[in-house]
Each structure stands twice: as structure tokens, then as C-alpha cells.
């Protein structure tokens, strides 16, 4: 994929115009650079300091907002169900939602839960707000569970792991 030239799809153009929250802030920064001239390697090099990876770019392709040059009007491929083991915290196995969708569903729940902790949860809230992908948010789940208790955590568990 590094030598591939990607462009924004019409769905991607609309997402950019509407400022929809489907992309994380750093993904949005990388997304803007896909102009049909830069290769994936060029964009990765330009965004390396932000921590953009091929997985971020693949997530944007899975969302249907990026496509190879010349295929930007083709229908977006259906996201492949990633293979993720059930979390050790007793979650349920993957049911077909992409990691990006899980992150988008879980992020608002996690920020709400940790913001509700007040000053005692300030650092955890900062960590959640700094989480830029599914893996980072899933790694914080046990700490959130411990801080808010089982009953409140259930919403986050459902969003992340169900």
C-alpha cells in the first residue's frame, strides 16, 4: 500500500465538508493530505510525528472515505471484521463492527464516564481524551471499569467489545 496513491471519495469530501466526527483529529489531518498526487508513503512520512500508521489509513479506506486513484467513485468496500480476541475483562467476542466503529461508539461513553468522576478522575479523563484509536481506548477500559464500577462500565463494555 505505501506506493498507492489514494484520493478522497465523494463520501470523504462530504465528511470533510460536514466536519463529521468519523475521523480522529490526527486521521483528519492525514486525510486532508490525500490529494491524488501523494502516495501513502508520502502521507505517512508527513504525518509520522503525529503517529499516523498504515492501520489509520486502512481504517479510512474501510470507512469508504479514501480510495485508490481512479476508483474514488466506486462503492466503498464493506469493512472486514477484524479478528480481535475477547478482552480479559470478561467482554464478549467481536460481532463484525470495525475497530473504527467501536472506537466511535465507545469514545463518547468513555469521556462521559471519566468526566463524571470529577477531579479524582482527571488524569484518566485526560488519557481517554488522548486515546486516538480503538486499541488505546480498549487499553484504558480496565482502569475506567475500576473507577466507575461494573454498572456504569457496562455501557462502555458494550460499545467497545460487544
Image: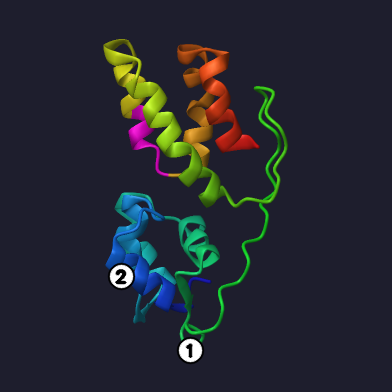
Q: In this orientation, which residue lies closer to the viewer: 25 or 155? A: 155
Q: Mark 2 to mark 1: distance in Å?
A: 17 Å
Task: Indicate the position of residue 16 as horizontal and vertical percent values.
Answer: 31, 66
Q: Which of marks 2 and 1 is nearer the N terminus?
A: 2
Q: Which residue occupies the foreground of this view, 123 or 75?
A: 75
Residue name at image x 34 percent, y 34 percent: 129
Magenta span of residues: 127-132
The relative height of residue 26 versus residue 18 in the rendered view (above or below) is above
Q: Does the magenta stretch include residue 128?
A: yes
User: In this picture, is 41 found above or below 129?
Assistant: below
Q: Nearer the viewer, residue 101 or 155?
A: 155
Question: Which residue is label 2 attached to?
Answer: 33
- Position of the C terminus, as image quadrant, is top right
Q: Residue 59 or 48: which is nearer the viewer? A: 59
Q: Quadrant of residue 111?
A: top left
Where in the figure is residue 99, as x and y percent of width and height? 56, 48
Q: Is residue 112 above or below residue 37?
A: above
**Which quarter of the figure has residue 65?**
bottom left
Secondary structure state at the residue bearing disc 2: helix
86 on left or right of 68: right
**Residue at (70, 42) in percent of width and height:** 94
- Residue 20 is at least partly visible in this image: yes
Give SS at disc 1. loop
The residue where tag 1 is placed is 70
Amino acid at each position: 500500500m505505501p506506493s498507492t496513491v489514494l484520493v478522497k471519495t465523494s463520501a470523504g469530501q462530504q465528511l470533510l465538508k460536514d466536519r463529521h466526527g468519523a475521523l480522529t483529529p490526527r486521521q483528519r489531518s492525514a486525510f486532508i493530505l490525500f490529494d491524488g498526487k501523494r502516495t501513502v508513503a508520502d502521507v505517512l512520512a508527513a504525518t509520522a510525528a503525529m503517529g499516523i500508521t498504515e492501520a489509520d489509513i486502512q481504517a479510512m479506506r474501510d470507512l469508504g472515505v479514501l480510495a485508490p486513484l481512479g476508483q474514488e467513485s466506486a462503492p466503498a468496500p464493506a469493512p472486514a471484521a477484524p479478528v480481535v480476541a475477547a478482552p480479559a475483562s470478561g467482554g464478549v467476542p467481536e460481532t463484525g463492527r470495525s475497530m473504527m466503529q467501536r472506537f466511535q461508539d465507545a469514545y463518547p461513553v468513555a469521556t462521559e464516564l471519566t468526566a463524571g468522576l470529577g477531579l479524582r478522575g482527571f488524569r484518566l479523563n485526560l488519557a481517554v481524551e488522548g486515546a486516538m484509536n480503538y486499541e488505546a481506548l480498549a487499553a484504558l477500559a480496565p482502569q475506567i471499569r475500576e473507577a466507575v464500577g461494573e454498572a456504569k462500565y457496562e455501557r462502555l463494555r458494550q460499545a467497545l467489545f460487544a
